[in-house]
Amino acid sequence: MAKIKVLITVKTYPTISGKYDELVCTAGFTEDGKWIRIYPVPFRKKDYEQQYKKYEWIEIDLVKNKSDFRPESYRPYSIESKIKRLEKLDTKQNWRARKETVLNKVYYNLGELIVEAKNKAIGTSLAVFKPTKILDFIYEEVSREWDKKKIAKLKASQDQTNLFDHPEDPFEVVNKLPYKFKYVYEDNTGKVSKMMIEDWEIGALYWNVLRKYEGDESKAIADVRKKYFDDFALTKDLYLFLGTTQLHHYVSRNPFMIIGTFHPKKETQRKLF
């Protein structure tokens, strides 16, 4: 066990795990600039003062997750491990402080990254990737409900005494997103790929604009596209945080998905004359 400082850069949209808990995959950088994944974290069941934000440094007792072969994967020492929130990096000077930690190693060739991921001596499962060009932002409709058996198990467990009980504040499972959102992009070889976006923020944005438009899904999707394509892809200096799932790491042709975006403004070069 070691107390580790982590700069949080990734929080994925909550999922219902096989063990019937709602969990969030968290990832970020250690003080020496290396990627680290923290899983499982029952984020929304944590006390408010422990609910860390992106680009906050946190301190937590972690151990290597021995059930996960990916080198970056750690887990809290116990489900009761306290999370100490520290300073937050601001966006001054076009995200300068954030860039100093985040952009130390950037991939431009997706094929090279996949080869590195599948090399068992390396096993890279988290990366910063810079697409050469974003071609499109697309969506597809998926199931609107979580697996009923998993939900039933989760609700049944709430009636039992366990570490997560908050009887004065009954826990409700987060809504399942009814759409998958994806970027279509080119890497520096011209290879075109589609990749799903699993970031918490895209889910939160969808629900917020859906409320704004009183349930009009087409308008909500248009607003999500406006943010992720018209804004991030066309006007910002967009980088993608990529991560694999343990299940698909060695078996999928491309095991990566987008688990976050990094989008400072484009740097403008000053004219010399």
Image (cartoon, rainbow, N blue to C red):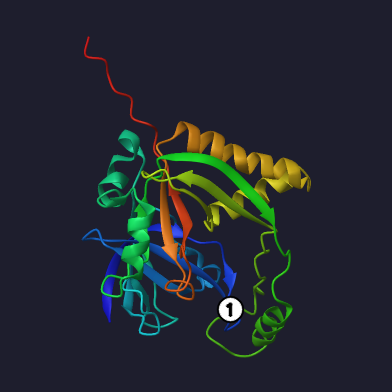
The reply to whether residue 112 is visible in this rendering is yes
Give the left or right position of residue 10, taking residue 101 as reference.
Answer: right
Seen in the picture, residue 118 relative to 268 is either above or below; the reply is below
- Pick out the residue farthest to the top: 273
Along the horizontal axis of the image, is 129 left or right of 185?
left
Which image quarter: residue 144? bottom right
Q: Position of residue 224 (x, y in %)?
A: 62, 43
Tell whether 218 sits left or right of 101.
right
Where is residue 1? Give x, y as percent. Answer: 28, 82
Which residue is tagged 1? 21
Q: Nearer the viewer, residue 9 or 155?
A: 9
Secondary structure at badge 1 equals loop
Residue 51's spot in the image, x, y percent?
47, 63
Q: Residue at x 35, y 84 (%)?
A: 66
The correct choice, above or below, for 37 with respect to 86 in the image is: below
- For image coordinates 69% across by 86% down, the residue present is 156
Q: Point out residue 14 in the picture as x, y percentages from the top left corner.
A: 57, 66
Foreground pick, 47 / 24: 24
Question: Which residue occupies 32% across, 76% down?
Answer: 61
Placement of 185 over or under 75, stated as above or below: above
Tag 1: residue type? Answer: Asp
